[in-house]
Image (tube, rainbow, N blue to C red):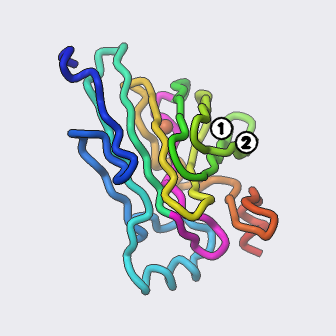
Amino acid sequence: MHIENIVKKLNLNDGCIEGAAVKIRKLSELQECFADETAYAAALAEGDKVVYSVSSIEPGDNGGDLHFGLGMIMPGRIGDEYYLTKGHFHEKREAAEIYIGLKGKGAMLLEDELSGDSRTVEIKENTVIYVPGNTAHRTYNTGSEPVMYLGIYPADAGHDYEAIKCKNFNCVVTATEAGPEMKKRSDYQK
Ligand SMILES: [Fe+2]
C-alpha cells in the first residue's frame, strides 16, 4: 500500500470503508444457511432483502499483508433464527482473525473443526474477539439496528465457504424470551 493510502475512514452510517468495494448478500444468496426452510421460503416470497454487506480492503498478498473488512448485518429473523452471515473456515485453516465490534448488537458462533465444540460470544461496541484458527465463524445480528464490526485477517487466509455449505454449522442462534440462545440445529428443527 502506498503511504498516502494507509489511513482508511469507516462510515458507520452506511457500513462502508471509504473508497472500498462493497459486496452485498441478499436473502436469495443464503439458501441452506437458515435452519427453518419453510420460514426462509416464505420470507423470500415477500422480497429478496439485503441481509448483510462487507466492504473490504485487500491490499495484496506478499505473505505478510493483512486484509480487513467492515461487516454490516441488518436486523431480522428467519423463523426464530437471527439474520446471519454465510460463515466460513479459512482456507488456510490455522489462520486466526480479529473482530472488533463497532455498533449494534450481535453474536458470533464459533465451531472448532477438530473438537466439534460450539460456542457463542457477544459482539458489541468496543469488544475484540479473537477467532482462533481451525474455527468456523458465523455472525448474527441479535439486535434491532444494523450490527457492524471490523474483521482483520492474514491476506493469505482465504475463505472456505464450501465446507460450511456441505455440513452447515452444528448450532443456530435464535431469539427467545430470555434473549439470544444457542441451540443445536437438530433440536431447533424438531
Ligand atoms: Fe474469517
Q: Is residue 142 above or below residue 55?
A: below
At x 42% / y 69%, what residue is drawn?
Answer: 27
Please report the residue visible at 21 percent of the width from the left and 39 percent of the height from the top: 19
Quarter of the rendering containing residue 4: top left
Coordinates of residue 133 in the picture (x, y in percent): 59, 28
Residue annotated with mark 1: 113
Question: Mark 2 and mark 1 in contact (Cβ < 8 Å)?
Answer: yes
Q: Main secondary structure of the magenta part?
A: loop
Q: Is residue 136 magenta?
A: no
Q: Secondary structure at mark 1?
A: loop
Q: Where, quadrant-wise, is the C terminus in this rendering?
A: bottom right
Q: Which is nearer the eye, 163 or 143?
A: 143
Membership of 84 in magenta stretch: yes
The label on residue 149 is: none
User: Which amino acid lies under the numbered mark 2 shown in the image of this protein?
Assistant: Gly
Which quadrant holds the N terminus?
top left
Where disc 2 sits, the SS reads loop
Percent position of residue 175, x then y: 70, 67
> What stretch of residues is rendered in magenta?
75-92
Q: Which residue is mark 2?
A: 116
Answer with the quarter of the image where residue 171 lies.
bottom right
In the image, what residue type sits under mark 1? Glu
